[in-house]
Image (spheres, rainbow, N blue to C red):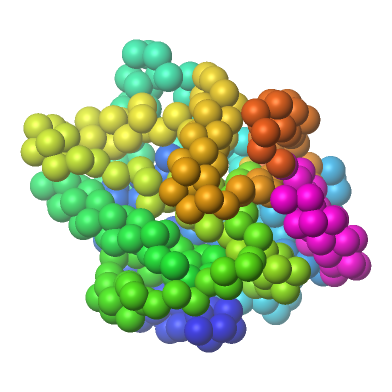
């Protein structure tokens, strides 16, 4: 399915939800958003996982300086351009503000203040001690209360837990996609689709896995890549560019990819914790690979990648290269890029720090840099 078809299908999906009375809630699709709580209240999540372009970035400069990250600029562009690039954005009722980074806060404020979307706030601690966990739980309950005030209906615990179990099963299915021997672009499409539609497309994902379980579509002579840093959003040409040059991404260590499907609960945890807020807090506690400035997040990421590279080498004999994708002015990834590259290269892993914005004019430069990197692997 092409990006255009995917987005047109998402448009119909949201239209139907809206006509059935569901409230549509948009958010910047980073980690730690309690989607199951939103779903238990009958809300439909609208993760903003769409790539930018020159016009969208330019359209944001009335509101924020051009030194804001290019993804955040584009998010404002989606809402401020008239007519909007994607009609389904007109269906959004709320924006969920979270403090994943400063840009996340600013963009959500701008969208809410200027484009007629009510705002719900959800703040997350930058640490992982016992107070941080208490704080996360307080914020969950605070968000729950605000949603209940809107819907004038209590959200029963059992409903939140049902949604947690449903999404948990779903994510485990999505994880199976990551193990298929297919090209990275096909996996990425499934991850993006999974994030847009959620568990409702589980049968489709299962069918996809069945169809591809025994196929071997990945090119054997392709250069195998771990892709980390910022996600590749829908409509971005980057994945095609990498594959045209002879690369194949075998692991998307990004919000759309491993960060999404790896955050699951074991049956033991699901059976032993009844309180759904406790479960969501447990997930937050264990999310130590994210980029949300958790203590030792850089070290955790380096160890994770080094282990993955070594395991892959032992199993398949291939050396993996790492592309660290940095959307321009994304503080989370640009601040650590030199240390990230240096420390992995000391351990024998080749890293390309690929910093870019969404300008069409830089495609040639990206191509040259990726090509040179592929030759080094
Ligand atoms: S600065 Fe980075 S983490 Fe923040 S919105 Fe931009 S891409 Fe996301």
- Seen from the viewer's position, the closer of residues 169 and 81 is 169
Res. 106 visible in picture: no
Decide whether residue 365 is among the magenta residues.
Answer: yes
Q: Which of 262 and 158 is in front in this view?
A: 262
Query: Residue 271 at what x, y percent from top left?
Result: 9, 38
Does 31 sit left or right of 327 as displayed? left
- Residue 281 colored in magenta in the image: no
Q: From this view, report whether residue 104 is shown above or below residue 343.
A: below
Tell me where the magenta segment starts and ends, as one range. Answer: 351-377
89 relative to 275, above or below: below
Q: What secondary structure prevails in the magenta region?
A: helix
- Report x, y in % for residue 283: 32, 35
Q: Position of residue 211 (x, y in %)?
A: 33, 81
Residue pictured at 61% horizontal, 49% vertical: 320
Q: Tell me, yes or no, if residue 268 can be seen here.
A: yes
Which residue is nearer to you in this view: 180 or 174? Answer: 180
x and y percentages locating residue 198 in the rendered image? 35, 64
Q: In this view, does 71 lie above or below 348?
A: below
């Amino acid at each position: 399915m092409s990006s255009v078809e995917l987005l047109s299908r998402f448009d119909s999906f949201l239209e139907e939800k809206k006509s059935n009375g569901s409230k549509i809630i948009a958010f910047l699709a980073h980690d730690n958003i309690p989607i199951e709580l939103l779903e238990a209240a009958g809300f439909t999540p609208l993760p903003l996982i769409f790539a930018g372009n020159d016009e969208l970035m330019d359209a944001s400069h009335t509101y924020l300086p051009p030194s804001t990250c290019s993804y955040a600029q584009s998010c404002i562009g989606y809402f401020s351009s008239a007519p909007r690039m994607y009609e389904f954005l007109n269906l959004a009722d709320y924006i969920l503000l979270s403090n994943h980074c400063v840009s996340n806060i600013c963009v959500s404020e701008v969208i809410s203040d200027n484009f007629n979307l009510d705002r719900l706030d959800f703040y997350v601690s930058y640490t992982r001690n016992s107070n941080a966990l208490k704080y996360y739980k307080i914020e969950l309950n605070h968000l729950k209360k605000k949603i209940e005030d809107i819907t004038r209906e209590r959200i029963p615990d059992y409903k939140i837990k049902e949604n947690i179990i449903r999404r948990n099963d779903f994510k485990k299915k999505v994880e199976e996609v990551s193990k298929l021997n297919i090209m990275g672009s096909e996996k990425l499409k499934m991850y993006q689709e999974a994030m847009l539609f959620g568990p409702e497309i589980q049968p489709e994902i299962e069918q996809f896995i069945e169809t591809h379980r025994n196929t071997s579509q990945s090119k054997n002579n392709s250069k195998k890549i771990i892709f980390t840093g910022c996600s590749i959003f829908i409509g971005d040409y980057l994945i095609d560019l990498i594959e045209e040059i002879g690369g194949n991404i075998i692991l998307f260590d990004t919000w759309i990819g491993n960060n999404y499907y790896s955050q699951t609960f074991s049956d033991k945890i699901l059976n032993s914790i009844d309180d759904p807020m406790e479960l969501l807090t447990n997930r937050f506690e264990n999310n130590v690979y994210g980029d949300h400035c958790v203590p030792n997040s850089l070290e955790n990421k380096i160890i994770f990648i080094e282990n993955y590279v070594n395991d892959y080498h032992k199993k398949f004999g291939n050396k993996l290269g790492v592309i660290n994708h940095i959307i321009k002015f994304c503080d989370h990834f640009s601040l650590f890029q030199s240390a990230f590259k240096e420390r992995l290269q000391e351990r024998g892993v080749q890293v390309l720090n690929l910093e870019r914005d969404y300008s069409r004019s830089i495609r040639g430069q990206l191509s040259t840099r990726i090509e040179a990197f592929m030759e080094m692997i």
